[in-house]
Image: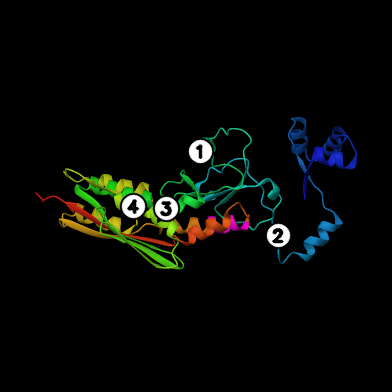
Amino acid sequence: MRIPVRVLAQGIGVAAPVILEMLKTYSSPQDRQKLDEGAVLQVDVETRESTEASAHNDSEPQPSRRLLARIPTAEGKRRVIVVVPPDLLEMPTADSPGVALIAAPTRAPRTRLDAGLYRRGLLESGAVLIQSPMDANVYHPLEEAAITFALDKLLLYDRVAGLLGATKFSVEELQVVSEGGSFTIRGGFEAPVGEIKGDFDKSQTKKFQSFMEVGSTNKGGEPDAEAAQRIADQAGLAFDPALNHLIAVVRDGVRKKTQTIRLNLTNEAKRNLSLGAALGSKFNVTGSADIRRGNDELRDVQIILKVEFGEQN
């Protein structure tokens, strides 16, 4: 157990300056210099009880996760951000790579990422935020992350198709698979027809009907495969087979007038979403049961796109 010098002094009834002098006497020259410069040192205090407890728990360590004052800079350390409620500050938890446990800020943060999330009202106690698979600095609350990320990927495809010279981009069919059933929309934007199978949450259907409205009509033009590839790379979709195929057939001059593509909109986000749902339940944040159920409803989102091109020169 590590205890700050001032706390130690209060605990044993000795003035802090006396403790500091004792530390100077028995410390190394380097530590004495730090003390003279006013650095805050910590001392290790081991009690009989803690020694005995550690001896009994060597096979099953119980680490305690320290809360962070701000979000880590490293992208891989913040795939999921949990704003831990005050009454759970001492909650022990196993080390979960990619999870940042932070305390709710009491004033506006200064760092860019923290400040942006704070302005959006997302750093409130109990929040579970999920990192976008296409932009490590974009986050959404767990309860709306799956649908938002799926729509972001669909819109990116529309943008890439435009760069490749497509004259029309449209959604022909969408299928959402849940734990208990599925929801399918066919017929395109003009005459969509929905079908529910099994025990699918009907409240989710309206959210997905807007996907059928995504589309564009362009004049076409000279394709820019290099620009399209850069967008795919920046979004972390360099190895997405459907996107790679679309770019390749245009770049190689073997595209058809109409390209039909089946696309999975949730592959990249599944890992972060599953981790976030588990943490929401573990920390017992408000509404975690509903959030977890909603996440289960979005296990897989498949979509069929139709990309049309003009006549080749």
* Residues under numbered marks 3 and 4 in contact, where contact means CB atoms less than 8 Å apart: no
Q: Amino acid at mark 2?
A: Gln
Look at mark 2 in the image and give the residue it sits on: 62
The answer to which of marks 3 and 1 sits earlier in the sequence is 1
Magenta span: predominant SS is helix
| Residue 44, label in figure | none
- Residue drawn at x 69%, y 53% is 91
Magenta residues span 276-282
SS for dot 2: loop
Real-space Cα distance between discs 3 and 2?
Answer: 36 Å
- Label 1–label 2 contact, CB within 8 A: no
Residue 231 in sight from this viewpoint? yes
- Picture coordinates of residue 86, whole percent (x, y): 68, 45
Here the colouring is: rainbow
Q: Is residue 24 above or below residue 84?
A: above
Residue at the image position 63 percent from the left and 55 percent from the top: 284
Front-lying residue, 31 or 13: 13
- The residue that mark 3 highlights is 147
Whether residue 255 is visible here, answered yes or no, is no
